[in-house]
Image (cartoon, rainbow, N blue to C red):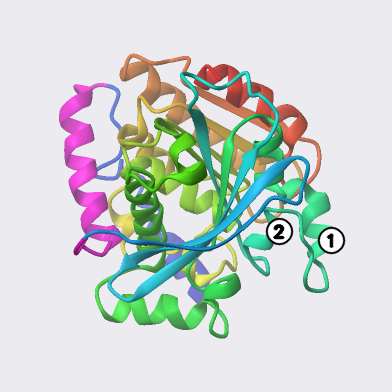
């Protein structure tokens, strides 16, 4: 037996994991137990003090939207940079003058500038062409779009994200937990009376989306941050066993000991009844489609048990590890009522 075989034998007990969804048991007690355990494993920071926001510039030169560059203080002294795109055209999604907000999160790319369609480095054009200009898409569909940088990536990158992921573990955190925490603090910031285009944010309709590592944050954030009105994770949903556990993935995807207790689809117990649209690629080599389909079967069972069987959907593109705007957005808008 080699090392990989040993680890598989340890992971494959043949028994239901202790916090996995059990359709034979009442739903709410399971959800409560799983949430407590997941938050314990995730290692998120604690909120300290009021979040503050610094506006760096406002650019009104694009005929499609007004751009506001800002940063919010997620932890004392630590600021997360963002770009907000306010559509200039009248939006059918406006309710009482307020627009739904889409938080747009890049995965392992050169940074959030991909979301606003601005190539800066070699390879950026390819990422943008792969449907990853999320903020441009969202603003074009009438959302107030916010491109948020992820810790360990883009402007918050210091070497690879392996180092901050390792450091987080040594202080009782995970980098994924810190990224989810930043999503939560951004929602806190949007609740402040900031004025300007911030005043157009409908805080009852805040959504999150992302591809790959951005999708990972989106899926797990929906399990934690219940102020989110919906999530659209792309090329990130699977079972841990068939993706994160089975092949080389960046360390920032890992939650220590998670497979002792629950699987990735079980987190739907925590996200329900929040609408989720899972986007996948049929040829995605690192989030294989068989794991997506297996996991989505569990999600459907959970959402049915939660009384919202129509609040989850799966859309699968014909290619690989990318976003599929043409098939994803119509489903998302319908599911969320936008």
Question: Which residue occupies 30% across, 23% down?
Answer: 23
The residue labelled by disc 1 is 125
Q: Is residue 215 above or below residue 297?
A: below
Q: Is residue 333 left or right of residue 163?
A: right
Front-most of 257 and 322?
322
Classify 337 as above or below 270. above
Question: Residue 13's x, y, as percent?
Answer: 34, 51
Residue closest to the eye, 35 or 108: 108
Residue at mark 2: 114
In the image, 326: left or right of 96?
right
Residue 302 percent location from the top left of the image: 37, 25
Q: Tell me: 136 left or right of 179.
A: right
Q: Quadrant of the C terminus?
A: top right
Choose between 289 and 145: the one closer to the eye: 145
Q: Which residues are magenta?
A: 24-49
Looking at the image, which is closer to me, 283 or 135? 135
Q: Is residue 138 magenta?
A: no
Which disc number belongs to residue 334? none
SS at circle 1: helix
Mark 2 burial class by Cα count in 10 Å: few <14, some 14-19, many 20+: many
Q: Residues within 10 Å of mark 1 (few under 14, many from 20)?
A: some
Does 36 appear in magenta?
Answer: yes
Q: CA distance from mark 1 to mark 2?
A: 8 Å
**Callout 1–callout 2 Cβ contact below 8 Å:** no
- Among the 4 quarters of the image, the one containing residue 122: bottom right
Q: Position of residue 228 (x, y in %)?
A: 39, 36
């Amino acid at each position: 037996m080699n090392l990989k075989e040993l680890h598989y034998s340890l992971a494959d007990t043949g028994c239901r994991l202790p916090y996995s969804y059990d359709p034979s048991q009442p739903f709410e007690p399971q959800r409560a137990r799983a949430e407590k355990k997941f938050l314990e494993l995730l290692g998120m920071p604690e909120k300290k003090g009021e979040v503050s926001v610094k506006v760096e510039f406002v650019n009104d030169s694009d005929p499609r939207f007004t751009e506001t560059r800002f940063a919010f203080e997620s932890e004392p002294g630590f600021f997360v940079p963002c770009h907000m795109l306010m559509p200039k055209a009248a939006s059918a999604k406006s309710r009482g003058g307020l627009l739904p907000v889409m938080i747009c999160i890049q995965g392992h790319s050169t940074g959030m500038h991909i979301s606003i369609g601005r190539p800066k480095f070699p390879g950026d054009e390819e990422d943008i062409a792969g449907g990853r200009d999320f903020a441009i898409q969202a603003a074009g569909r009438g959302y107030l779009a916010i491109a948020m940088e992820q810790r360990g990536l883009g402007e918050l990158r210091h070497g690879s994200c392996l180092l901050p992921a390792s450091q987080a573990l040594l202080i009782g955190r995970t980098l994924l937990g810190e990224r989810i925490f930043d999503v939560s603090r951004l929602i806190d910031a949007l609740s402040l009376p900031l004025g300007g285009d911030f005043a157009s944010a409908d805080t009852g309709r805040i959504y999150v989306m992302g591809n790959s590592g951005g999708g990972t944050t989106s899926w797990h954030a929906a399990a934690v941050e219940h102020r989110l009105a919906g999530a659209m994770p792309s090329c990130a949903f699977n079972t841990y066993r068939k993706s994160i556990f089975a092949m080389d993935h960046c360390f920032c995807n890992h939650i220590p000991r998670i497979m002792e207790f629950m699987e990735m689809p079980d987190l739907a117990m925590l996200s329900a009844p929040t609408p989720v649209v899972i986007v996948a690629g049929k040829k995605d080599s690192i989030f294989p489609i068989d794991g997506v389909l297996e996991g989505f079967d569990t999600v459907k069972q959970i959402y049915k048990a939660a009384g919202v069987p129509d609040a989850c959907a799966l859309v699968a593109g014909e290619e690989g590890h990318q976003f599929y705007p043409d098939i994803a957005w119509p489903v998302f808008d319908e599911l969320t009522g936008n």
